[in-house]
Amino acid sequence: MNTEQALKINIPGSNNTLVTIVKAFVRQRYNLVEDDQADICIIDLDAYKANSLLDEIRKQHPVRPIIGLSLNEVAHDNIVFLKKPFRPDDLTQVLDQVSLKINQPKVIVADKIVGSIHRAATAVIEKSADKNRHVAHHGVTNRSDSVHYNPAEFLQGALINAYCQSIDTGITHRMEAWWNPIIIFPKIKKVWVDADDKNLQAFCRLPLKTFARYQAHDRDVANEVKIQPEPMLNTDDCPGSLQSMDAFLWKVAWWNAGGQLPLGIEHDQLIQLKYWPNITRYLCPDHVVQMCAILYQRPVSPLQVSEVLNIEHKEVYGFISAAHALGLINSIEDQPMKSSRLSESTKPVAKRHNVGLLRRILSRINRR
Amino acid sequence: MGQHKLIFTGPVGAGKTTAIASISDDPPVRTDEAATDMTKQRKPETTVALDYGVMHLPGEEKLHLYGTPGQERFDFMWDILSTGGIGLMVLINNNRPDPLKDLCFFLQRFETLIKSTAVVIGITQTDLKAEPCLQQYHKVLNKMNIRAPVFEVDARSRNDVSLLVQALLFSLDPGLSLELEDKDGKLETA
């Protein structure tokens, strides 16, 4: 398509009123044309047989962008929605947005952005994984003596912002934060990123600012995290598999935490799981099921969980950080817990059952 | 020789038979018959009496895995099977017309067992239908004042069914520690 020429619009199946309105609104910037010449379609979704018309257009022109007009909020895949009534500016804004998209290449080439920093980070994780497999699995590092990390300084913070924008608008968004672009599809609750877990974990080890310094000589990183709508991007443009938004955020938070607690949660503070995470679909290292059970049953502090399970604090803190990122953690009180006894934290629900039996079943089910 | 029971329940097509087969040590016993009613639209055969599998534990102990028939007209079997169970595994088929209603129904129907033990809920077929989402299941449970683990499960996956069983065991006793069998079948704390 020649970008110097005005974009060609077709308004199929509509009465003259809509055509007149659109013509008046877009003036010389866009041309109204017949179906076979059009770059974009505008459809009145409230019109009689709009759905069948939509199906027909998609069948005949599968890649042609469609702008849907309606009085009510509607969720159609791959349609840019414009609510009626609309002002001339609203329409031209949407048309400009779609026009920009048409003139952009659709293929996402991730490697352009990451460069040497990505490779260096990958090397770090590979070295670490060789040294200590357990540590690599849990994303535990010794990068700081502090108990806390600030999610806002990591990919987690930027990702949550992007999720919020995408969910609020219902539009596919693209996020770039010094790494491979992350595409968010809010309607199907999936994300796409052109990287495997090893690369993602490597990227999660450092705050975004650190990557920014490498690449931009200490410019303000806040300005460099780009979150932008991509209304015309669909899953076909993203090679490979999509991941669940929740599962992706869960592991990003776990790895960003690096064995620390998120700001706002103290190691001796009583917390409780609101409900169990979707553990069959999330990153699920050892002890996750047990941590879920303990934190779900009653309020307990992160330190106590660590003591009961006899595992490193960092493992527990990673789990709590991931659950916190998904909004699964309830803080019970502001005061640190001092008096509650440890034994009360893990009271069996069904006393009559033989604990030995449960252990034997557990052993059996874990063994194979 | 200890004999213990673990009960799998849920509506037709939820994956009870498959889940039992995923973790049973012996080939499961099935009582399938050709479906003749509405069930026929979902699958050609359905369980009419029970599904049975077994896990062999050290010391000749056995954990019997019982799957209840999904159809309500065989509900006389439910009480027989569930008596003495160590806990309840509810599987809900997300691809049925009203899975939230199914959940309420089975939780109410097995209320006695749940009160005396624990329950875990596995949502199956979410790849075929994503809604209702887990949050909607949690809302139903809150309304019923039941706190229980709920997560997605592929009944064909041994790992998924194993996590569901583990969730039940740790719900019964969160302080449970893992013990490993040695060659003689004796246990050692891990």
Image: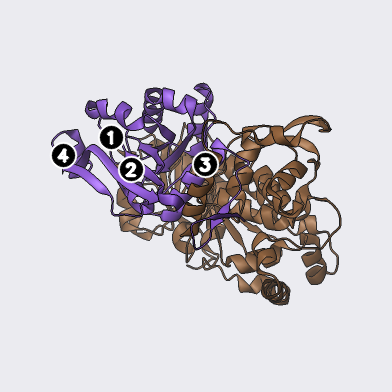
Chain colours: A brown, B purple
- Identity, as a three-letter code, of the amino acid under mark 4: Ala
User: Residue visible at 41% across and 59% down?
Assistant: A63
| Contact, mark 1 vs mark 3 (Cβ under 8 Å) | no
Discs 2 and 1 lie in a common subunit: yes
Discs 4 and 2 lie in a common subunit: yes
- Identity, as a three-letter code, of the amino acid under mark 1: Gly
Q: Which of B19 and B95 is in front in this view?
A: B19
Discs 1 and 3 lie in a common subunit: yes
Quick check: A143 above or below B39?
A: below
Residue A123 in the image: state x and y as whole percent: 70, 76
Q: Distance between the residues labelled 2 and 1?
A: 9 Å
Residue A96 in the image: state x and y as whole percent: 57, 53
Q: Mark 4 points at which residue?
A: B35
Discs 3 and 4 lie in a common subunit: yes
Q: How far apart are marks 1 and 4 (CA)?
A: 12 Å
Q: Mark 3 points at which residue?
A: B169
Mark 2 neighbour density, 10 Å: few (under 14) some (14–19) many (20 or more): many
